[in-house]
Image: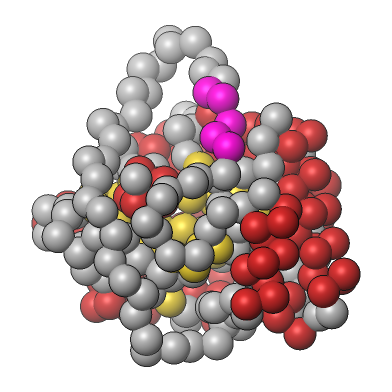
Amino acid sequence: MTSLDRRSVLRVAASAAAAGALASGCDPKRSADSAPSVRAADGPSPRATGRSAPARHPAARPPTRAPGLPAEIEHGPRDGHAVALTFHGRGDPKLAEALLGEAERAGARITVLAVGDWLDAQPAMARRILDGGHELGNHTMHHRNICALPADAAYAEISQCADRLRKLTGSIGSWFRPSQTQRATGQVIRLARRAGYPHVLSYDVDSLDANDPGAPAVQRTVLDGIRPGSVVSLHLGHAGTVAALPPILDGLRRRGLRAVTTTELVT
């Protein structure tokens, strides 16, 4: 993306924020409980971004399988130097492109949990996320309140999004994250395993960016709550999140932390 293109996209983001015309996000239930720590891991080296480099088409990862980790993962190892920034995948693709570009300029890798109907509308985004060196996962087909659904409907939400991911990338994605909740019920965990996901991905830091509080508030919430091993919940499709990402990444660097994919964090 050229400097002019980048400025144009960020102007679109700022305009969207002012108008309030942003995609809706999750409304998770909050919990103060914390999950067990997991093994430490080294993070990735920054992505090379040479202007004349050929297009890359990295293979999509299969679901992450890590023996010894809980069925629902809330955070990674607390004694390392890495964190995972995870994004609920839905909303304006221009804002998604702008956010991915900011992450890549900073050498950060993120995890995107895509909603299936968004992939239907924006199929090129699946490949774009992977080609940027990031991680892709499943956030249900229609973003319904999955924990309130009967088993057959809940399974359809998981399996239909998995089918979209497989069609677009050859894999059902690295992770499953339930919609409209921070934590899954036992039934949802069992259904996710039946669909092929050994673990359900939760988080320990909620950025609250889906409420569109503005970039300074998103930055403050994330940096106040984050610590080594954190898994942070954020959203694509929100201009305030795009604007908040560079200072968040700067704040992590000042603390000696780096943003890696969730799989790199926990394996």
Given residues 111 and 50, the one toward you in this image is 111
Question: What residue do we see at 55% from left, 87% from top?
Answer: 29
Q: Is residue 146 above or below residue 266?
A: below
- The quadrant of the rendering that contains the C terminus is top left
Count the marks. Answer: 0
How has the structure been colored for display? Answer: secondary structure
Give coordinates of residue 75: x percent, y percent: 35, 66
Give the quarter of the image for residue 84.
bottom left
User: Left or right: where does residue 37 sit relative to residue 5?
Assistant: left
* Residue 15 shows in this picture: no
At 72% across and 64% down in the image, what residue appears?
A: 191
Q: Is residue 158 visible?
A: yes
Q: Nearer the viewer, residue 253 or 86?
A: 86
Quarter residue 34 falls in: bottom left
Highlighted range, magenta: 58-62
59 inside magenta stretch: yes
Q: Is residue 99 above or below residue 248?
A: above
Kindly give the residue lying farthest to the front in the view shown. 68
What residue lies at 22% left-to-right and 41% top-to-bottom? 42
Which secondary structure type mostly characterizes the magenta part of the structure?
loop
Residue 6: percent from left, percent from top: 48, 41
Judge left or right: residue 187 versus residue 181: right
In depth, the one of 218 and 170 nearer the eye is: 170
User: Toward the viewer: 77 or 132?
Assistant: 77
Find residue 201 and report its horizontal and vertical position in percent: 51, 63
x, y percentage for residue 8?
54, 45
Q: Residue at x 65, y 58 (%)?
A: 193
- Find out whether residue 98 is within the magenta segment: no
Against 60, residue 183 (above or below) is below
